[in-house]
Amino acid sequence: MAPQAPTQAEAAAARAAQDQATLIRGIELQNSGQLAEAEAIFTSYLHAHPCDGIATYSLAVILMQRQDHARALAILAPCVAVTPGFAPVWMAYANALQNVGRREEALVAYDKAVAINPQYTEALINSGVLLREQHRHAEALMRFQQVLAIKPDHETALGNSGIILTEFKRTEEAVAIFQRLLTVNPNYDWGLGLLGYERLHACDWTDFEGMARNIVEGIHQGRKTCKSLPLMAFSDDVAAHQISSRLFGLRFPQSNQPLWTGQRYKHKKIRLAYVSPDLREHPVGHLMCGIFEHHDKNRFETIAISLGIDDKSRLRGRMLDSFDKFVDARMMTSRQIAELMREMEVDIAVDLAGYTADSRTDVFAHRPAPVHVNYLGYPGTMGVPYMDYIIADRYVIPQEHQRFYDEKVVYLPDAYLPTDAGLKIAERTPTRAECGLPEEAVVFCSFSHDYKLSPPLFDVWMRLLQQVPGSVLWLMSRGQTAQANLRNEAAKRGVDPARLVFAGRVPMVEDHLARYRQADIFLDTHPYNAHTTAADALMAGLPVVTFMGGAFPARVAASLLHAIGMPELVADSKEGYEALALKLAQDRPLREALRTKLAANQKTHALFDTERFCRNMEAIYISMWRRAELGEAHDQLSGD
């Protein structure tokens, strides 16, 4: 008897079972990393079943992994219309939109995914990160808090929430979040540093020595205990700085599709691009503005790639006037920025941010220009293969330290730190009474950020106050919590907390600089020196006392003092630093002589000669450009 033909329903069921088996096989291949085989299955399946949600989502993920965002969008756009109730497709669509820079549309798509599935934590996390990138921090924080309401121990949500709270300067809440994060996962990447660094911002020195030791030991063991920038406040171990930067740099791998592949442009002028989030009222902005204005426009075409906010400040206005082209790139993806730089045929691209806030290291990972330079904003190596040079001086990076820098070290003849000679200090000096200072006593000053203060340094400062009767320490603390903690620390060391005086903010930088005239001695911080702040003090005629440490950020003040011809203010140890500061405090004629020398040297030495500095910078750029035009390796450029 012939077998009975399957019914229509049975045939449909068999086809459905086969389809399901096909999809399962494709997913298995995808999960095992056999992407080409999985892609073939999903592509074939979609020919037979257009806009199937699972197949579309799976194929889109593969396409986006290989950066084929255009094709991913092409298959996702019709699918969200056909299967509007399938949250993963909206999620993939949002990812694809975000990857091509259509950020507002991406947020709408993420919201669609969350509306379908309110528990979709991945969509909440991704949209929170996108909002944070757009500087919409309050909205981003709400997304991460939604995740924590669903999963209280979600590590990514905890980490991002804590970081945003630091940006809002809600330090106590941030510290609590980071402590909770480390309870959930003691080995969370960068977690120990996140906690310790935020404590430093509040001058909360709980177990400072133990935390610093654990951070540095962990870095030497290759563990991600602390990001490279916060590490600078805990240690001046130059080898640890390099290891930490290399670990952090793994987040920005070199693109396998470089945009510049050896072309020779042969421009009449060198096209020089500065990439920075800080082209505004910011220390980097103040340091560089005069350089931007002094560039030789007969030899250089200057381009600004602005990654940060437009604060409408006077400084921003000066910059807008100084560049040949000014690109506001805030809303562009890193790849789009890199593609624009390649289209503009940039010869030399200078990263002024490194691993500081709102930087875009991945722009450089796409190799948009023949020459990439790490300069100024980040005082250390970036530890990545696509940064060609770091510009320094022989004090911040002595020759024997070059092995700790992945870039080729190129030296400026004087200090590496620029200054703006066009900035004029206010003529009127506020009285000591207006500043809350005693009329006759010695005023020690340190206007560095709170996070640069540490217990070993504070011990020195309190001993100085004890040995110099009536003296005060003039600080620039940003928060009430930090001020209270510092006063408590003074009392613990037997010093009247009233001898700590805190300067308030003033709206004009010219007025702020004028206040330095009422101090007697500027006490540098360690292991993270005053950089811009030390230059400000010297510009205002205030002697700076420092001691030279091991790594770049612990050597900057010494560099500045050598450039202004005042090496006698550089000690070689913490003990020498304390002895020198005490000697100056007890010898008024010596202090006055140093002030007189400093005022004279401002007119004759290099530190405040912006035009001279710019010409030296340009000589370096020209050498880099010539090497690139000749196709010679970057490591052949002389560091002399």
Image: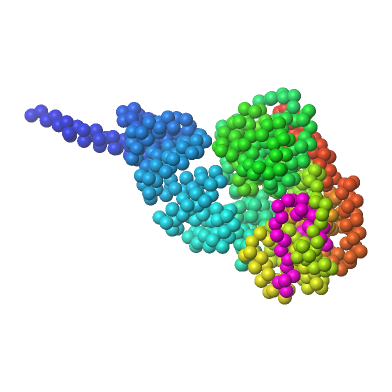
Who's the residue at 65% across and 52% down the image? 229
Quarter of the view holding residue 572: bottom right
Residue 515 visible within the image: yes
Q: x, y percentage for residue 54?
A: 35, 38
How many numbered marks, from 0 up?
A: 0
Q: Is residue 253 above or below residue 578?
A: above
Quick one: quadrant of the N terminus?
top left
Quick one: quadrant of the C terminus?
top right
Drawn side of residue 309 relative to residue 107, left or right: right
Who's the residue at 47% across and 52% down the image? 142
Who's the residue at 66% across and 42% down the image? 312
- Residue furthest bottom as drawn: 494
| Nearer the observer, 113 or 526 | 113
Q: Is residue 361 above or below residue 183?
A: above
Who's the residue at 89% across and 50% down the image? 601
Residue 552 visible within the image: no
Quarter of the view holding residue 633: top right
Q: x, y percentage for residue 610?
A: 81, 42
Any magenta on residue 598? no
| Nearer the observer, 288 or 313 | 313
Drawn side of residue 5 relative to residue 393, left or right: left
Q: x, y percentage for residue 509?
A: 74, 51
Q: Is residue 92 above or below residue 531?
A: above
Q: Which residues are magenta?
A: 496-524
Asked which colour scheme the image uses, the reply is rainbow
Quarter of the view holding residue 370: top right
Any magenta on residue 518? yes
Drawn side of residue 390 relative to residue 11, left or right: right
